[in-house]
């Protein structure tokens, strides 16, 4: 799994990317001119302490890893985690992830 680490890549996605949202997640999608997709995760300190934020990031990375074969290549996917996510289960987070992929049309057509 390749991740977005550069501030400028995040900024480009926020400024020029297309955004999609649901109750738990916001997704910014932007073409990256590479032959693979990259994952970026943003989570506010208002969400909780570091332990909670890191747990949510690990969960998001695991969900992304599970669904990455079904995600189109050549995009930066920046997920913003909303404040209510610490209160939901892993299954609900996975469901929110699948929903936002469907809405953004980032799933490969079968």
Image (tube, grey):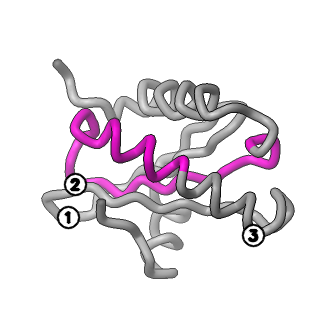
What residue is shown at x 61% (from left), y 34% (from top)? Answer: 90
Pointer 1 residue: 33
User: What secondary structure is found at the residue carrying circle 1?
Assistant: loop
Q: Is residue 39 left or right of residue 94?
A: left
Mark 2, other Cα within 10 Å: few <14 / some 14–19 / many ≥20: some
3, above or below 23, in the image: below
The part of the chain drawn in magenta is 59-85
Q: Nearer the viewer, residue 104 or 101?
A: 101
User: What secondary structure is found at the residue carrying circle 2?
Assistant: loop
Mark 3, other Cα within 10 Å: few <14 / some 14–19 / many ≥20: few
**Whether label 1 touches label 2, CB < 8 Å:** yes
- Percent x, y of residue 9: 43, 74
- Percent x, y of residue 8: 47, 80
User: What secondary structure is found at the residue carrying circle 3?
Assistant: helix
Pointer 2 residue: 74
Pointer 3 residue: 50
Q: Earlier in the sequence, mark 2 or mark 3?
A: 3
The C terminus - image quarter: top left
């Amino acid at each position: 799994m390749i991740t977005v680490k550069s501030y400028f890549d995040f900024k480009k996605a926020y400024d020029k990317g297309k955004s999609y949202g649901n109750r738990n997640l916001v997704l910014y999608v932007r073409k990256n001119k590479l032959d693979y997709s990259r994952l970026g995760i943003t989570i506010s300190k208002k969400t909780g302490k570091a332990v909670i934020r890191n747990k949510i990031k690990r969960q998001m990375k695991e969900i992304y890893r599970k669904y990455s074969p079904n995600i189109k290549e050549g995009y930066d996917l920046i997920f913003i985690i909303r404040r209510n996510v610490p209160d939901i289960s892993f299954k609900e987070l996975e469901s929110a992830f699948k929903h936002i992929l469907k809405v953004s049309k980032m799933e490969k057509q079968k």
